[in-house]
């Protein structure tokens, strides 16, 4: 997908903000962002879609920050540098995935990605 198409699509589908639920609501296993109280199926579809997009955006953003942290931890200029095996262990990844994340993080840190852009 072309970069301009991607940015236009991201603007069009700006996800709803994720709000933290009160502790008592989060403790109730039947409660999920008050979706269980919405009776109108159109409204339920709309709100659940907003939440889906918000969770996807949050997950994508979190992965970018994981990658940047992995790249920083693997930086050979650091005296406390970690191996990809160490990073994989800490993040509960496979070593191959850790290597890919380190490379992705390096690309992001060089300005080749979107983390931190706003």
Image (cartoon, helix red, strand yellow):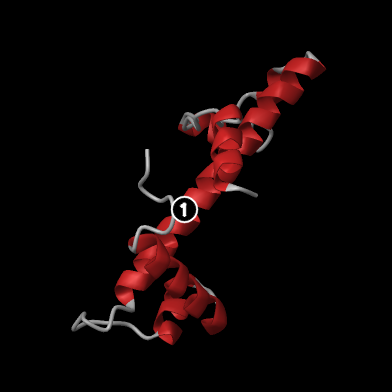
Say whether residue 62 is left or right of residue 50. Answer: left
Residue 28: in sight, yes or no? no
- The image quadrant that residue 117 belongs to is top left
Q: Please name the residue shown 69% across and 33% down the image.
A: 30
- The image quadrant that residue 42 belongs to is top right
Q: Relative to 48, is 79 above or below?
A: below
Q: Position of residue 22 (x, y in %)?
A: 47, 29
Q: Nearer the viewer, residue 46 or 11?
A: 11
Q: Position of residue 108 (x, y in %)?
A: 40, 61
Q: Which residue is mark 1?
A: 62
Say whether residue 48 is left or right of residue 3. Answer: right
Q: Secondary structure at mark 1?
A: helix
Say whether residue 99 is left or right of residue 50. Answer: left
Q: Relative to 61, is 17 above or below?
A: above
Outermost residue, right direction? 41
Q: Position of residue 100 (x, y in %)?
A: 51, 75
Q: Please name the residue shown 54% across and 39% down the image.
A: 7
Looking at the rendered image, the quarter that the C terminus falls into is top left
- How many marks the image carries: the answer is 1
């Amino acid at each position: 997908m072309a970069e301009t198409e991607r940015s236009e699509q991201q603007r069009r589908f700006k996800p709803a903000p994720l709000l933290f639920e009160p502790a008592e609501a989060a403790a109730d296993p039947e409660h999920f962002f008050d979706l269980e109280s919405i009776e109108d199926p159109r409204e339920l579809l709309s709100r659940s879609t907003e939440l889906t997009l918000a969770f996807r955006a949050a997950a994508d953003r979190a992965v970018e920050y994981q990658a940047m942290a992995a790249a920083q931890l693997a930086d050979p200029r650091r005296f406390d540098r970690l191996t990809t095996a160490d990073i994989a262990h800490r993040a509960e990844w496979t070593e191959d995935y850790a290597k890919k994340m380190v490379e992705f993080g390096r690309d992001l840190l060089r300005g080749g990605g979107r983390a931190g852009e706003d």
